[in-house]
Amino acid sequence: MPTLREIEAAAVLIRPHIPTTPTYRWPLLEHGLGCELWLKHENHTPVGAFKIRGGLVYMDELKRQQPEVRGVIAATTGNHGQSIAYAARHNGLRAVIVVPHGNNPEKNNAMRSLGAELVEHGNEFQEALEFSRELAATEGLHAIPSFHPWLVRGVATYALEMFRSVVDLDAVFVPIGLGSGFCGIAAAREALGLKTKIIGVVSEHAPAYALSFQQGQFVEQPSTTRVAEGVACKTPNKDALGQVMRHAHEIVTVNDDEALTAMREIIQATHNIAEGAGTLAYAALKKQADQWQGKRVACVLTGGNASMTILRKALEH
């Protein structure tokens, strides 16, 4: 886990690309919950999601440690790929991104617009990931994982911003895909010596981390979510899972219908777009509102890259 000094250095590195994202209270969103709700807007970055922070830090480390590198490859359902494409272009590197068939078309177009070469393979993230490793070997590309300490160091900068802008938070709700967002929150909390509880949130239709947490052991489970592709995890990362086991107060599951309802409510109350995974924190808080009466709580809106199809479903839901 990164230290406070390392997180602050990462914040300096990314600042030319990403101004501090806001943490707002939205009265319409808060109404009826019985708690003080703060929303951390990671949908306000140049790629519409928090992942860009990790991508910039990872690429900076890679260039310094392996100056001979000429290209990178990553597997993604979208936001990680946009992050890597953005950072690779900034550093003059070739970027190849592997996505599963049927991936969010808007995210695919966004990655191409950032200069990435897009390859479609498999029907889920795990199949795309395994194929990306094969391509890395055959094409001489550096394979960037979806979870890595360098990524966590960059991602932790959003948590540092949040904790310093809103003091004395009782709890933070954060989605878990492969775990960098959760670990960034945990790293910043530990570095600042805070007692804030961290509530992880997963899709009910991608429950691998929730099952692993409940059973106290590594558990794989296929993902069937059609709304929250950003957390469509079948195989937990063992390093991330270890941190989740250590730092999570609880893990809550949210189904696709609940995510769509949360997406519509966020649009209606804040005029911000949240993608399926980005709605999970708020949707989970709604399910647990009775437990947080009178408390100060934050939810991380991790990204806003929802497809037009999903947005229509949400608005009609």
Image (tube, grey):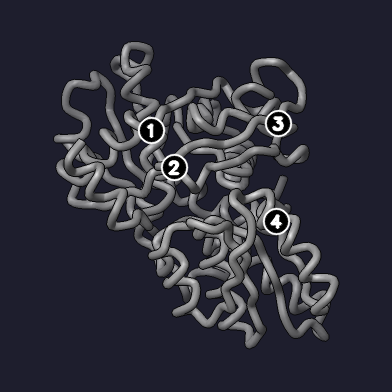
The answer to whether the residue labelled 2 contacts the one labelled 1, judged by CB atoms less than 8 Å apart, is yes
Marks 1 and 4, Cα distance to the nearest angstrom? Answer: 24 Å
How many other residues sit within 10 Å of disc 2, few (<14), some (14-19) or many (≥20)? many
Residue marked by disc 1: 256
Using the rendered image of the protein, determine whether residue 5 is visible from the camera's viewpoint. Answer: no
In the depicted view, which residue is nearer to us: 131 or 194?
131
The residue that mark 2 highlights is: 228
Q: Amino acid at mark 4?
A: Leu
Looking at the rendering, in which quadrant would you find the N terminus? top right
Q: Residues within 10 Å of mark 3 (few under 14, many from 20)?
A: some
Indicate which disc, 1 or 4, sits on the residue closer to the N terminus. Answer: 4
Q: Residue at x 40, y 42 (%)?
A: 227
Residue under numbered circle 4: 129
> Is the residue 45 above or below the residue 175 in the image?
below
**Percent x, y of residue 297:** 37, 29
Mark 1 falls on what kind of element?
helix
Q: Are marks 4 and 2 in contact (CB under 8 Å)?
A: no
Q: Are marks 3 and 4 in contact (CB under 8 Å)?
A: no
Q: Residue at x 60, y 37 (%)?
A: 186
Mark 4 / mark 2, whichever is N-terminal? 4
**Residue 133 % position (x, y):** 78, 62
Label 3 and label 4: CA atoms lie apart by 15 Å
Residue located beneath label 3 in the image = 220
Which three-letter amino acid code belongs to the residue tagged 1?
Asp
Q: Are marks 1 and 4 in contact (CB under 8 Å)?
A: no
Residue 222 sits in which quadrant?
top right
Query: CA separation, marks 4 and 2?
Result: 18 Å
